[in-house]
Amino acid sequence: MLLGMACGESVAGSAASCHLALELGESLVARGAVEPELVLERWLRLDHPVRPRPGSITSQALQLFEDGFPVEGLAEAAARVVPGRSGDGPLIRALPLAIAARHDGAQLKRWANQSASITHSDLTTRMATVGSCLLARDLLTRSLADSLARVAQAVREEAPLRLARALRLPSRDEWPEAGDDAAAVLSQAVHGLASATDLEGVLQQVENQDQPRAGALALAGGLGGAAFGINPAAPRLARLDRTLRFRLEQLAEGLVDFQAHQDLSRTGADSTSASAARDS
């Protein structure tokens, strides 16, 4: 999943989303929770070449935070600077959460919403981030059709209608939604998945779309990696920066261990509760 994300973003000649995802994922493993202020501080320490693109909602939020604006209300302030649109960045950077909470859908929804809310206040972006994380989680073990149906049901009461349209299996003659906001990028990624049988095919499908977006390529790569795995000999993988690839692989291992520890903690808590119930 993480390497697929990196392969997708590299097509656009960028690695900003990957580095945001790394910092978010590493922070979660270290702290056991999504802590907005800590995540923002880690993002600010990134070198400028891998910072969010200037003019984006995330970039504006980081600038406000760097200028001393408090975390509380930061997303709403950024929305006033960049009004009237949702953003695709949170969908991609939240993908590590799908590994950390893949056995706990309720926790995954909370963390995904929290991570998006650090910089984005609009409902479409927040619910698209939740949907993308749930979809990535389900694609690890389920078909695209089954995964989309489950995710659509999970967000049915909260997701805007436009987002609900993106979370369904597209027909062969249907085109993805145009644009670079959250719902459009999710639509483009889902269309790429629906027309391919491996990660390379997913990325090619998105590249062939009208005006392919960096966000759609990165998201489609992450979802494609979850659905199909990744060929260790793939040329795109070989072209990744070695340091970035190593950090992503280390993060994946850390997230798996983190999730296993969470499972053990829940099992222990359940056993304690059952024992107390028997004693009473």
Image: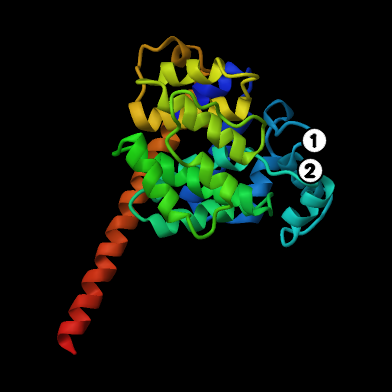
Give me the disc on residue 227.
none
**Is 67 on the left-hand or right-hand side of 152?**
right
- Res 182 → quadrant: top right
Mark 2 = which residue? 60
Mark 1 = which residue? 55
Kind of residue sitting beneath label 1: Gly
- Report x, y in % for residue 10: 57, 19
Q: Which residue is drawn at the image coordinates 62% and 49% (left, top)?
A: 124
Count of numbered badges drawn on the protein: 2
**Is 57 on the left-hand or right-hand side of 194?**
right
**Is 54 on the left-hand or right-hand side of 261?**
right
- Report x, y in % for residue 91: 56, 41
Kind of residue sitting beneath label 2: Gln
Can residue 243 be seen by looking at this rendering? no
Disc 1 packing (10 Å; few <14; some 14–19; many ≥20): few
Can residue 47 be seen by looking at this rendering? yes
Q: Which residue is drawn at the image coordinates 84% and 47% (left, top)?
A: 81
Q: Which residue is drawn at the image coordinates 81% and 49% (left, top)?
A: 64
Circles 1 and 2, Cβ within 8 Å, touching? The answer is yes
Element assignment for label 2: helix
Closest to the observer, 31 or 136? 136
- Res 12 → quadrant: top right
**Is 55 on the left-hand or right-hand side of 207?**
right
Disc 2 packing (10 Å; few <14; some 14–19; many ≥20): many
Q: How far apart in space, not on screen, are marks 1 and 2 (Cα)?
A: 6 Å
Q: Which residue is drawn at the image coordinates 54% and 36% (left, top)?
A: 186
- Report x, y in % for residue 185: 59, 33
Element assignment for label 1: loop
Closest to the observer, 160 or 47? 160
The quadrant the C terminus occupies is bottom left
Could you tell which of marks 1 and 2 lies nearer the N-terminus?
Answer: 1
